[in-house]
Image (tube, rainbow, N blue to C red):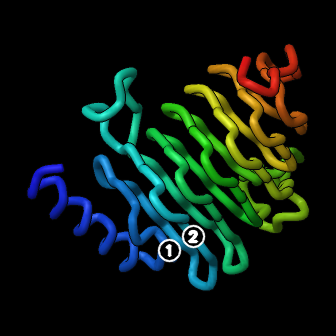
Amino acid sequence: MGLGRTLYSWYGRQCLRWRGVQGGTAARLFGVPLVTRASGSTIYLGQRVALCSSARWNPVGVNHAVILRTLFADAEIRIGDDCGLSGATICAAHSVCIGRDCLIGANVVITDYDFHAVAPARRRSETARAAIGCAPVVIEDNVWIGMNAIVLKGVRIGRNSVIAAGSIVTRSIPENCLAGGNPARPLRLLGIMGA
């Protein structure tokens, strides 16, 4: 890594710290992530997390910078050691927890919140999480989520699983499987030694 890249990564890690992000002391930054942390909430990065926020550093490109955003004071985002995210959006009203060694592909969206009430009369004005729809998301260790996939509230993705590109995950996926589609469903089991 050249001196310019080293200084840039150091500065980027300082920016994360200034925004209240915990951990991430050895984070590798490729471009500048967008971080919005609600007062009292937690955003935690494990060791050696890579955040790719620039198309320059991703062969298929990214539509925008990595976005990490908490919406309420008790919300949390936790990203485990050795994870890589490319242009991904993670938005938590309650909690989004990602295990170790996960790959989050270009332009993936992960959220635990519906953002608007379904009832037409309250769609614009309702702010209560219970009325809108909010449930924790858990992504276990060594999961690969393909580009442009969407992971919605209340989902748990089991360890070692792969979510196919463009899938919409609306319900939990077991460990050690390839899942895909809209809505995503298990397509086949993955062998112990890989596919």
Which quadrant of the view contains residue 76? bottom right
Figure check: 175 above or below 136: above
User: For this rendering, which residue is in front, 143 or 52?
Assistant: 143
Going by the numbered disc 1, the residue's amino acid type is Gly
User: Which residue reaches farthest front?
Assistant: 193
Q: Secondary structure at mark 2?
A: strand
User: For this rendering, which residue is in front, 61 or 9?
Assistant: 9
Going by the numbered disc 2, the residue's amino acid type is Tyr
Image side of residue 165 versus residue 191, left or right: left
User: Which residue reaches farthest left?
Assistant: 3
Name the residue: 90% across, 64% down.
130
User: Which residue reaches farthest bottom?
Assistant: 40
Q: Which residue is mark 2?
A: 44
Total labels drawn: 2
The residues bearing labels 2 and 1 have C-alpha atoms spaced at a distance of 6 Å
Residues at badges 2 and 1 in contact (C-beta under 8 Å)? Answer: yes
Name the residue: 45% across, 40% down.
87
N-terminal of the two: label 2 or label 1? 1
Q: Crowdedness of circle 2 by 10 Å Cα count: few (<14), some, many (20+)?
A: some
Q: Secondary structure at mark 1?
A: strand
Figure check: 41 above or below 101: below
Q: Crowdedness of circle 1 by 10 Å Cα count: few (<14), some, many (20+)?
A: many
Which quadrant of the view contains residue 186? top right
Q: Which residue is mark 1?
A: 23
Residue 125 position within the rendered picture, expressed as x and y whole percent measured from the top left: 74, 61
Residue 9 position within the rendered picture, expressed as x and y whole percent measured from the top left: 25, 60
Q: Quadrant of the C terminus?
A: top right
Residue 33 position within the rendered picture, expressed as x and y whole percent measured from the top left: 38, 55
